[in-house]
Image: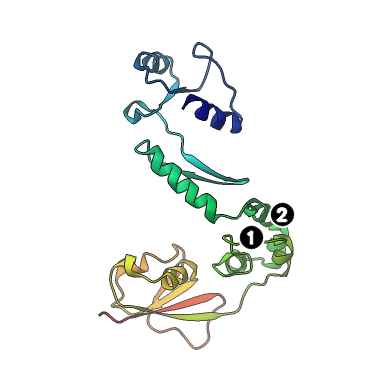
Amino acid sequence: MADAKLRLLERAGATIVGEDAQAALAIVANGDEAAIARLKARGILVNAVDLPELCDFTLPAIVDRDPVLIAVGTGGVSAGLAAALRQRLEALLPAGLGRLADALSSARSSLRARFPTVDERRRAIGGLLAAGGPLDPMVAHDDPTAVIASGGAGESRLELVVIASPDPDALTLRAARLLGLADRIYHEAAVPAQILDRARADAERLRGDPPAALLPGLTVHLVWKAE
């Protein structure tokens, strides 16, 4: 266990020292509570392996797609669960995800020039990265830079979503995805608040039917038809 923690810290760029040296963090992998107490008395933050009640911090399981990092933590409750989730995520995320992030970073200035307002940029990038979009992050891409250069802001679009249950967990994948992407949502008064809460935080919420002339971006019309 100590060797595994050591590899993780070295990979993160840490300088490894002995117990008596000056340090900011300490890993105690042998359950030595006396050592834990000595380190804490010196003001050093301690991770005590398999003793979550004695931990000042925990080390999450890491999915590394540099510069994209995904940390899976359980607050020390179950390192095995965190590791299992990390393994599943490793299989789902393309190895080239970091190249996509770098391409988006490099294109920041050109995107700002092409789409001067924040809303225009958000729609353009959201359209590129949407599920099934030209740069869906869950799919491998040979040349994301070229795709970004050719991407547009997207047309005005209206999607109808019929809600039959007040339980947000009963939303279909399509409904949840559209709510997460919508620029504005028109809804009937009967649509439960917990459903509207699943929409993107900055999406407009407007009661009534959408107008004939739509604003740019994605408009979702929520219709309530309880079972």
- Identify the residue shown where x is 34% and y is 25%: 54
Quadrant in which the C terminus appears: bottom left
Residue 60 on image: x %, y % = 46, 38
- Identify the residue shown where x is 26% and y is 79%: 226
Q: Residues within 10 Å of mark 2 (few under 14, many from 20)?
A: few
Closer to the camera in the image, 21 or 221: 21
Residue 212 on image: x %, y % = 49, 88
- Identify the residue shown where x is 45% and y is 64%: 200
Closer to the camera in the image, 206 or 83: 83
Which amino acid type corresponds to the residue marked 1 in the rendered image?
Ala
Number of labels in the image equals: 2
Q: What secondary structure is found at the residue carrying circle 2?
A: helix
Mark carried by residue 99: none
- Which of marks 2 and 1 precedes in the sequence? 2
Asked if marks 1 and 2 touch (Cβ < 8 Å), the reply is no
Side of 167 where 38 appears, left or right: right
Residue 186 on image: x %, y % = 41, 78
Q: Quick check: 7 above or below 95?
A: above
Which tag is nearer the camera, tag 1 or tag 2?
1
Q: Quick check: 89 above or below 175?
A: above
Residue 104 on image: x %, y % = 67, 57
Which amino acid type corresponds to the residue marked 2 in the rendered image?
Ser
Side of 11 where 180 appears, left or right: left
Q: Residues within 10 Å of mark 1 (few under 14, many from 20)?
A: some
Q: What secondary structure is found at the residue carrying circle 1?
A: loop
- Residue 50 occupies quadrant: top left
Q: Residue furthest left?
A: 227
- Identify the residue shown where x is 53% and y is 12%: 21
Mark carried by residue 106: 2
Q: Which residue is mark 1?
A: 140
